[in-house]
Amino acid sequence: MNKKNNPVINTDKCKGCELCVSECPVEIIAISDEINIMGYHPAYITDSTKCTGCIKCAISCPDAVITVYREE
Amino acid sequence: MITGKILYKRPKTLKDVNMSYCPGCSHSLMNKILCEIIDEFDIQKKTVVIAPVGCAVLLYDYIDCDSVEAAHGRAPAIATGIKRVNPDNIVISYQGDGDLLSIGMAETIHTANRGENITVVFMNNAVYGMTGGQMAPTTLVGQITKTTPSGRNPENEGYPIRACELINTLEAPYFIARCKVTNSKSIMQTKKILKKAIGYQINKKGYSFIEILSNCPTNWGMKPKDSNKWIQEVMSKYYPVKIFRDKGEA
Ligand SMILES: Cc1ncc(C[n+]2csc(CCOP(=O)(O)OP(=O)(O)O)c2C)c(N)n1
Ligand code: SF4
Ligand code: SF4
Ligand code: SF4
């Protein structure tokens, strides 16, 4: 069975720069219509079941607000 | 509560604060990469980062290491002093293009020429970011800035300076490279190169100069993604991404 990956975005600290969006090979990152505490539209995960755990989103996030977990 | 193995998390040396850089700015990214390398070498307690005058002026609020805020352009001189007094400190001079190539040109060249055992991280974003986007020594020919509203004209403002190429004319430097951080792949390559440079310093090999082609989405008037595309398609044509010298591999 495939292990489950879990990408988590700290939406309070996301600046909505969108750099993670185009990095995700399975296109599961989108920009929210909501506005966070800093006034930005934060990124969110649309379907974490598809995440491959490649961490490309986390590597490219300038503000280091993405953590990626793998279920053990 | 989310549990499991952590595949990626924020480096511990990067303080849990909001960095004041604009969304998508390469400064944020490189502050983070620097912290990842400091963690991986486990050198947080002996690293001293010299902050420049420019957008990275508040670096010491983000990177949890000893640091000194240098007068404009003088970071490599401060770095020299610290390194000579305490050679076991890992000393990193972090500077923008206005800081490093305008007001700090003398310090830049002479520090490189002496081959001080420090690591210079040169953030080349082709403008003065902090002061609102004026022309820098690295502004491209034809590039529109606040002080070159019709585009940089070499007859009036001279040609853009290629820092790696200039430093590559000196005998002493040990490692000289130009990198980019436009996507996850190039970020990983850049991290490898900067880690090598800091490794050389740890092993007392000598001076490294690592230039990062950086974006300034705010003053370029572009979305972060488009600014990275501009680096890829325009900036890196004039400033080739490559390793200019690596005495460790020679
Ligand atoms: C002695 C002195 N001269 C001028 C300034 C104004 N000043 C502040 S930042 C800066 C240039 C910043 O540009 P750069 O080094 O490219 O860094 P960036 O902000 O783009 O990261 C200048 C000229 C100053 N603070 N001190
Ligand atoms: S870890 Fe990879 S697959 Fe998962 S969200 Fe990030 S970029 Fe997408
Ligand atoms: S890269 Fe980071 S800061 Fe930018 S939108 Fe994605 S999560 Fe937010
Ligand atoms: S002004 Fe430019 S260099 Fe400065 S933080 Fe904003 S995007 Fe980055």
Image: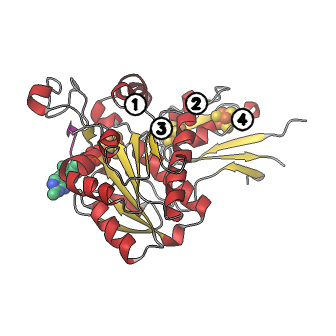
- Most frequent secondary structure within the magenta stretch: loop
What's the colour scheme? Answer: secondary structure
What kind of residue is marked 2? Glu
Q: Secondary structure at mark 1?
A: loop
What kind of residue is marked 4? Ser
Where ligand 4 lies, by image quadrant? top left
Q: Nearer the viewer, mark 3 or mark 1?
A: 1
Q: Is mark 2 within 8 Å of ligand 2?
A: yes
- CA separation, marks 3 and 4? 26 Å
Which residue position holds label 3? B181
Q: Secondary structure at mark 2?
A: helix
Residue B171 rendering spot, x and y as whole percentages: 35, 51
What kind of residue is marked 3? Val
Q: Is residue A30 left or right of residue B239?
A: right
Q: Residue at x 39, y 70 (%)?
A: B83
- CA separation, marks 2 and 1? 24 Å
Label 2 CA crowd tier, 10 Å (few <14, some 14–19, many 20+)? many
**Foreground residue, B179 or B57?**
B179
Dots 4 and 2 on the same chain = yes
Which residue position holds label 2? A23
Q: Residue at x 33, y 39 (%)?
A: B165
Residue B162 rendering spot, x and y as whole percentages: 29, 37
Residue B130 showing in the rendered view: no
